[in-house]
Amino acid sequence: MKTNRLTACLAVAFAVATPAASAQILVDTDPIHLPVAGYVVTLKGDTLRGKVAVTGVNNYVTQISFRGPDGTDKVKYGPDDLLAFGQKRPDLLRDFTDLTSVDKEQVHYESKEHPRRDGKKVFMERLMDGRKIRVYNNPAGGEKSTSLAGFKLAEKESSYVVQKTDAKPFVLRKNNYEEEFDTLFGDCTEFAAYAKSQPDFRKFRQLGLVVESYNTRCE
């Protein structure tokens, strides 16, 4: 019933947008504080599965707890202790069937350097995966978002955190997206040629489609 309400709310909220545009709006998930099925990735690259709960938030997630399937003691981890963690979503995402890099069943976090604080790591929610460009939630820039059933409609968000290959993550804002477009995506000849025939690519709401197209064409 909860999923049906969420789907209905999203359908109403996106009714004014074209189908192509509405499918590309990225959403973030409110931190899941109750223990749910998930995983952690250790600094050695080992994946451990069990129950994961978010226990600390300061804009970004700063701490989680993990309990293994054998009922071992609960362990707390921070961004310096893990490479990543994930949790099963409370509701399946149903609005991103054309974005293959958006995981509809699990929410994923990665330990990354804070985009504005050198030497500080945080857990960032990964909204889109990709070999060349990844997109993360920027919780500090979401004051204009609208929350529906635990999800924020990112159409109104002012920024995301973007990481290109292994460079330091940076904040990509809606108000300078068009100016940054060529710098961010212009190093791939095939994508640049294709983008010339897609003028909507320079609209911030199409970021999801742009990133997926870039990652697919430029691997």
Image (cartoon, rainbow, N blue to C red):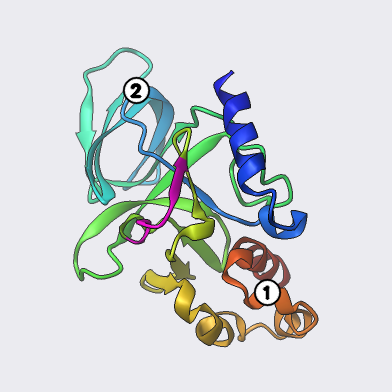
Displayed quadrant of residue 77: top left
Q: CA distance from mark 2 to mark 1?
A: 39 Å
Where is mark 2, residue-wise? 35
**Which residue is located at x 52 percent, y 87 percent?**
179
Is 151 rendered above or below residue 217?
A: above
Say which of marks 2 and 1 sits in front. Answer: 1
Identified by mark 2, the residue type is Pro
Q: Is residue 185 above or below residue 48?
A: below
Mark 2 secondary-structure assignment:
loop
Q: Quadrant of residue 171?
A: bottom left
Residue 58 versus residue 83: which sits nearer the camera? 58
- Residue plotted at (56% across, 69% down): 132
Image position of 112 (left or right of 164) = left
For label 1, the crowd category at 10 Å Cα-Cα, with few meaning under 14, some 14 to 19 and many 20 or more, is: some
Residue 6 occupies quadrant: top right
Q: Decide: is 180 above or below 142.
A: below
Reading the image, the residue beneath label 1 is 201
- Please tell me whether residue 207 belongs to the stretch shown in magenta: no
Structural crowding at the residue carrying mark 2, measured as other residues with C-alpha within 10 Å and reported as few (<14), some (14–19) or many (≥20): some
Q: Which residues are magenta?
A: 141-147
Q: If you read the primary sequence from the N terminus, does the residue marked by circle 2 or circle 1 appear first?
A: 2
Please tell me whether mark 1 sits on a helix, a strand or a loop.
Answer: helix
In the rendered structure, which amino acid carries the disc numbered 1?
Phe
The image position of residue 107, as x and y in percent, is 48, 40
Numbered disc total:
2
